[in-house]
């Protein structure tokens, strides 16, 4: 992987005022970690908030989770606090979901390796707000850099009212699903469990648990300091604030960018140095995401309403530009094969359905699938939706369905033995701009 520095789309404003960078303020150009002292110089001290003050602020801010499910964060905080209040033993922990199992994403690793105190601040503030006994930061075994920096940052901060520790979990796409993270913390294998109960009901140590994505908690650290009105100064009324987006594929400077919601997709690509060649489609939302024709995507903004109109969501904040000279069908078959192999093997429709879908995708890409098999593929995609204990099959179905639509013409070309791709690279792989280890 080549190194490229994360960048921001708009710079020059101090944090605490409208403008960007917010999350990425203070980021060293070398990617060097921001010390506790420097972090405080950039953002100010950790605010002391009373009782439910933080929860109300977060609710008013309209912040939504950045781990992919897009859930309202204030509502989750309120629910966990209430569950803790009514259960013996209270809330066991705030778990930072830093698994970042999406291969095309590197935003959480960037936060951990360069700006760890922002995430730790947010986790602590959330722990105080919901009455949690400890903070547990969960990172992947392979993210050695994140682990090392986080341990150093925790030591650097000194004591806090609530203890913080870092744990590592295995790599693997479904290991980052929240019930899998909790199951592993409880001593089990890192496999999703059937819900309910959900972590907010019965999570770590069998008690109510708050689990949030690392970026979500970093956003909380800023809202607590500067307020919900400040948060809403960027973005749109429906999608307030800024978001970290990992941009890769056919762009000049792939990497992690902080953008405000409502940014035109054209500007998003320009922030990543612009397109390096003609592009046929964008994959929005990562491996659980949606292919959108470039001509359509280029007309819209980075906003839930705009993306939803094209059947897409931002997921965990991933945009990949697929060059015109690559084969979308072959790339999609590769992603589906990877995702099918990542099934945790617990639910029949997921295990067998995804394996079948992957085999038919391979046949489509190989030009050997009949029209009947293509129709079967569509039926299987529809049938696996909602049939798993977790949303893994739903994510695969969304990706596969969009690939069938966008690359429809390629299916016919492949049958005729004509793959139009001049160069089949790996545009749908891990971004070369990943700056974190
Ligand atoms: C298969 C699968 C994998 C997931 N992997 C991650 C992950 O690596 N990191 C993450 O934060 N959320 C992941 N999620 C989403 C989590 O289950 C959960 O929604 C999220 O951690 C909640 O945090 P948020 O509300 O702050 O977004 C995954 C979900 C699924 C279905
Ligand atoms: S749906 Fe798939 S990944 Fe999710 S628990 Fe069932 S088998 Fe595992």
Image (tube, helix red, strand yellow):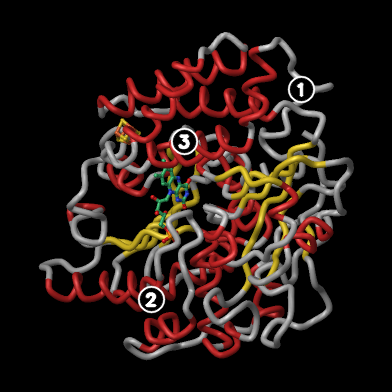
Between disc 2 and disc 1, the foreground one is 1
- Decide which of tag 3 and tag 2 comes sooner along the chain: 2
Circle number at residue 74: 2
Q: CA distance from mark 3 to mark 2?
A: 27 Å
Q: Position of residue 359 (x, y in %)?
A: 47, 15
Q: CA distance from mark 3 to mark 1?
A: 24 Å
Asked whether 354 or 215 is in front, the reply is: 354
In the displayed structure image, the side of residue 330 where residue 338 appears, left or right: left
For image coordinates 52% across by 59% down, the residue present is 308
Mark 1 beta carbon near ligand 1 (under 8 Å): no
Q: Position of residue 347 (x, y in %)?
A: 26, 29
For the residues labelled 2 and 1, say whether their Cβ atoms are less than 8 Å apart. Answer: no
Q: Disc 1 marks which residue?
A: 424
**Which quadrant of the rendered structure holds the C terminus?**
top right
Mark 2 element type: helix
- Decide which of tag 3 and tag 1 comes sooner along the chain: 3
Asked whether 324 or 150 is in front, the reply is: 324
Asked whether 326 or 71 is in front, the reply is: 326
């Amino acid at each position: 992987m080549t190194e490229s520095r994360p960048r921001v789309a708009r710079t020059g404003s101090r944090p605490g005022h409208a403008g960007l960078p917010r999350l990425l303020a203070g980021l060293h150009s070398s990617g060097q970690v921001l010390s506790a002292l420097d972090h405080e110089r950039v953002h100010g001290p950790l605010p002391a908030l009373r009782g439910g003050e933080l929860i109300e602020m977060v609710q008013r801010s309209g912040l939504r989770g950045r781990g992919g499910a897009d859930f309202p964060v204030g509502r989750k905080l309120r629910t966990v606090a209430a569950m803790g209040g009514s259960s013996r033993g209270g809330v066991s922990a705030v778990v930072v979901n830093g698994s970042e199992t999406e291969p095309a994403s590197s935003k959480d690793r960037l936060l951990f390796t360069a700006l760890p105190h922002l995430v730790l601040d947010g986790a602590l503030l959330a722990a105080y707000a919901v009455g949690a006994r400890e903070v547990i930061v969960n990172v992947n075994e392979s993210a050695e850099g994140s682990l090392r920096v986080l341990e150093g940052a925790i030591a650097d901060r000194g004591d806090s009212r609530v203890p913080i520790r870092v744990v590592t979990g295995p790599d693997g796409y479904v290991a980052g699903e929240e019930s899998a993270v909790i199951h592993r913390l409880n001593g089990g294998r890192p496999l999703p469990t059937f819900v309910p109960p959900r972590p907010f009901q019965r999570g770590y140590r069998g008690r109510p648990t708050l689990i949030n994505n690392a970026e979500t908690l970093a956003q909380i650290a800023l809202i607590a300091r500067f307020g919900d009105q400040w948060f809403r100064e960027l973005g749109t009324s429906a999608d307030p604030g800024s978001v970290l987006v990992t941009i890769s594929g056919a762009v000049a400077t792939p990497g992690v960018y902080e953008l405000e919601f409502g940014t035109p997709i054209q500007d998003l690509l320009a922030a990543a140095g612009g397109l390096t060649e003609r592009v046929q489609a964008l994959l929005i939302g990562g491996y659980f995401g949606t292919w959108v024709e470039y001509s359509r995507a280029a007309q819209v903004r980075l906003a839930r309403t705009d993306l939803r109109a094209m059947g897409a969501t931002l997921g965990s904040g991933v945009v990949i530009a697929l060059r015109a000279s690559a084969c979308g069908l072959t790339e999609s078959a590769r992603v589906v094969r990877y995702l099918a192999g990542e099934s945790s093997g617990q639910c029949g429709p997921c295990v067998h359905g995804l394996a079948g879908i992957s085999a038919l995708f391979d046949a489509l890409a190989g030009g050997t699938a009949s029209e009947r098999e293509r129709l079967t593929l569509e039926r299987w995609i529809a049938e696996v939706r909602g049939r798993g204990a977790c949303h893994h099959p739903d994510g695969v179905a969304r990706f596969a369905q969009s690939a069938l639509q966008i690359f429809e013409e390629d299916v016919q070309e492949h049958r005729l033995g004509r793959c139009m791709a001049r160069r089949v690279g790996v545009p749908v792989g891990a971004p070369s701009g990943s700056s974190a280890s």
